Image: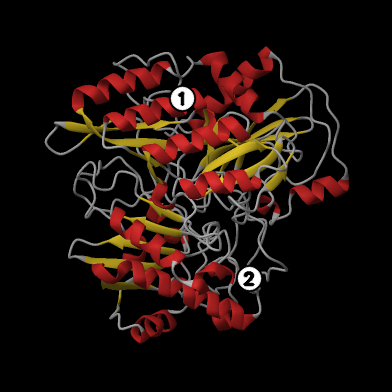
Amino acid sequence: MPLTPTTAPTGEEPRSRTGDDACPGALRLHRADDGFLARVRLPGGLLTADQAEELALAAEALGDGALDLTSRGNVQVRGLGSGCGAELAERLRSAGLLPSDTHERVRNVALSPLSGLDGAGRADVTAWARELDGLLCGTPAAAGLSGRFLFAVDDGRGDVAALGADVTLIAEPDGRALLRVGTDPAAGRAPGAPAPQRPTGARPDTSPAAPPGEGPSGSAAAYDGPDPAPALRVPADAAPRAALLTALAFAAASRDSGAKAWRVWELPARHALTESRVRAALARAGIHAEAAPASGATAGRTSVGTPETAPLGAAPAPGLVPAPGGERAALSVAAPLGRLSLAQWRLLVAAARAGRGETRVTPWRGVVVPGLAAADARHWLGVLAEAGLVTDAASAWHGVGACTGRPGCAKSLADVRADAAGALAATTPSPTEPTPAVRRPERRLPVYWSGCERRCGHPRGRWVDVLAGADGYRISIEGTDRTAARQVAPAPRLGGPTPGAAEAERAGTPDAPGLPDAPGPTEAAAPVGPLRLAELATTVAAARRVP
């Protein structure tokens, strides 16, 4: 039954920011409950095997001995000491992971992870991602972008085109590129457009690193107002430069407006990045651009080699990814709940050395290892499965994510990673137990466990929201594609305090994810018992099923 929207159209301007964004970086460390946190940007998720090994050495020597994958294809090191910032920076510089101190937080470039590997895209666009990163680092004005501004480089299959990026490049079949300016991924709002209605349960895009889910895309395609986001066709060889110029046009508009906008859709209407403004910025640089129809702005999917059942925004399925011809293959694996031990990470490094010496961290908290001989790929897939990585799309662990939770985040009301793992273990095999070959992957919604109302890193599209509260977990279906949320079932926790009004208000602050572990309640609810975990697991599994 549809639910009544809780907010009517207001016509309000996008809210002006009052300060700089506080996204962590490799040089700007963030204080968390478990020590300091560093976020290392990996444009396109691209890493050489040597660079990946250096990250492991840094986490081993300076951090907590694990690596977290983010939903923008970056890596986080947690548990850092207060005096290790200089040593970490020097390690990253030596590995080529810190090419510009002034630009390190703005190197947010998402790439189709399988581009050039499976024959499914319209073009291999990894070179676009590398060139765009070089242009960013070589342009002083680009350092003024916020740490949340996102570029997406899509090879035409429509995966990262659904990320809700500020500037998206999509390969087209005629050797051109579609340049798309972003819309509000929560409301489908074009730049500068009034805020539309939001269905119950839909929230502003509060996560600086929230990935799309596996369901229908809820970003650009959701907007149905009169002012669609600008979309222009540009020559392929000018695509990275066009993306940078569009970002610089945004920075200038933000500066002129005085609004301190962090994302494109936060610009006031008078300063919005309209088609004419973007085209003029490109023309001044000698780049010819043609307007694309509104349908082109939300397309970005090739029909060549892409399974018809794969929705827009779909992550690479775990398992073997055969290359054209069948002689070579890539590995696609997911990190259980987004976290990898150093032993697991080093196995990925070893697999990369058996291939072409590189890995790709995906925006879905996974890793792709390209270029292995087919027989070697099968061997390494078994090794990684035994080590506890998710290697099978039929695994119940596939598509399950969680925020940091306790004890790393003071704001969290629960150890959500432990509860998520316990709930899965209560009814399903662990990731180390292979899924029977006869099982076929079911269509399931992604599920995300959150320790507080901020829901840091939650998926896009439709997803199962498992939200910790002082008195239990609330399980609901959330979505940004105009589908209303509904209550599935409560799963009470045992005991625990209720946060005060100040903490509750702070937990719902839209800016909270900029501070991923902001101060909050100092006590959490009591641990969930085995019976409650089984009840949780059953309820979540039922909510995930797609009719």
Lateral position of residue 422 relative to residue 369, left or right: right
- Residue type beneath disc 2: Pro
Q: Residue at x 46, y 64 (%)?
A: 137
Q: Is residue 78 above or below residue 5?
A: above
Residue that label 1 marks: 344
Q: Position of residue 497 (x, y in %)?
A: 86, 31
Element under disc 1? helix
Q: Position of residue 98 (x, y in %)?
A: 49, 53
Q: Residue at x 66, y 38 (%)?
A: 80
Residue that label 2 marks: 14
**Which picture quadrant has residue 499?**
top right
- Residue type beneath disc 1: Gln
Element under disc 2? loop
Q: Which mark is residue 192?
A: none
The answer to whether one can see residue 240 in this image is yes
| Measured Cα–Cα span from mark 1 to mark 2 | 43 Å
Q: Is residue 138 above or below residue 157?
A: below
Q: Position of residue 14 (x, y in %)?
A: 63, 70
